[in-house]
Amino acid sequence: MRDINADQNDLMNESMLSRNERNGQGGRHPSRLDAWISTLDHSLRTLAGVAPMSRPTPQATQPDEALTDAQRREAAALMRVNHVGEICAQALYRAQAMTTRDDELRQHLEHAAQEELDHLAWTAQRLQALNDRPSLLNPLWYAGAFAIGTVAGLVGDRVSLGFVVETERQVEAHLDSHLTRLPAGDHSSRAIVAQMMAEEVEHADAARARGAVELPAPVKGLMRLAAKVMTTTAHRV
Ligand SMILES: [Fe+2]
Ligand SMILES: [Fe+2]
């Protein structure tokens, strides 16, 4: 009777061989199935809140002031909205990375997604410190954003990048308004939002530099409407 490890090795060799044949490039590129599995794994980790941060949370330069309960609730509601925004950013970037056929663009999108993963972790941590919870509808937001990202990616790379530019521009405007709305004494939330805002601007600039097209006004309007529904709901739920 053959050793079970030998059988497993044969199976792995066969699978690698067929994958190499499919790619015709010595297996340097992952197959579509690999990409789907990796994306699914990533999606589940994102929703489970176990995504690790690669950079420390931005720190305020002065200590937080004591918040009233109403101020704490408002700060938490805004950070929950930002957390949902980052859930959507993960879904969009991962869907777009999966649909592009340009390896270099895929790497760029994955790098941006990694920075967004830090944003996700920072906002989650702040929500916890404010004694509050993420949106209960996160799986729904993720699925919706993933669907939109997939459609944008399938239309073409320059449209997909145009979508990144418009999304980042809208997120930047939201974060800017949050800097006005957050309680003045909540320096920790402010430090996180300010750092995120600076990076969203960089993401938009990078997408523009890669040849993003300007999206038509009705598409931008629809995106604003979708964002309005999301932010209004996430403020509470
Ligand atoms: Fe972000
Ligand atoms: Fe971003």
Image (cartoon, rainbow, N blue to C red):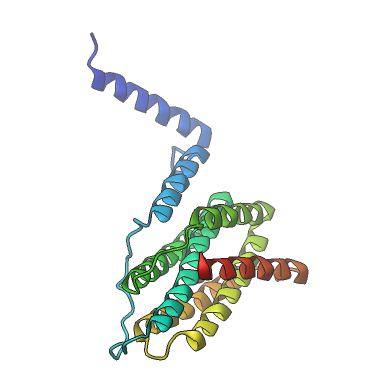
Corner quadrant of residue 230: bottom right
The residue shown at (52%, 59%) is 93
One can see residue 199 in this view? no
Above or below, comparing residue 30 to residue 183 in the picture: above
Q: Residue furthest front?
A: 69
Q: Residue furthest top?
A: 1
Above or below, comparing residue 55 to residue 14 in the picture: below
The residue shown at (46%, 59%) is 110
Above or below, comparing residue 74 to residue 41 in the picture: below
Q: How many numbered callouts? A: 0
Corner quadrant of residue 140: bottom right
Q: Nearer the viewer, residue 108 or 138?
A: 138
Corner quadrant of residue 193: bottom left
Horizontal and vertical percent for residue 51? 36, 58
Question: In the figure, is residue 169 to the left or right of 129?
Answer: right
The residue shown at (51%, 88%) is 180
Q: Which image quarter holds the N terminus?
A: top left
Horizontal and vertical percent for residue 115? 42, 67
Horizontal and vertical percent for residue 94? 51, 55
Q: Nearer the viewer, residue 217 or 81?
A: 81
One can see residue 190 in this view? yes
Q: Nearer the viewer, residue 56 or 237?
A: 237
The residue shown at (68%, 68%) is 225
Horizontal and vertical percent for residue 5? 24, 22
Q: Nearer the viewer, residue 153 or 138?
A: 138
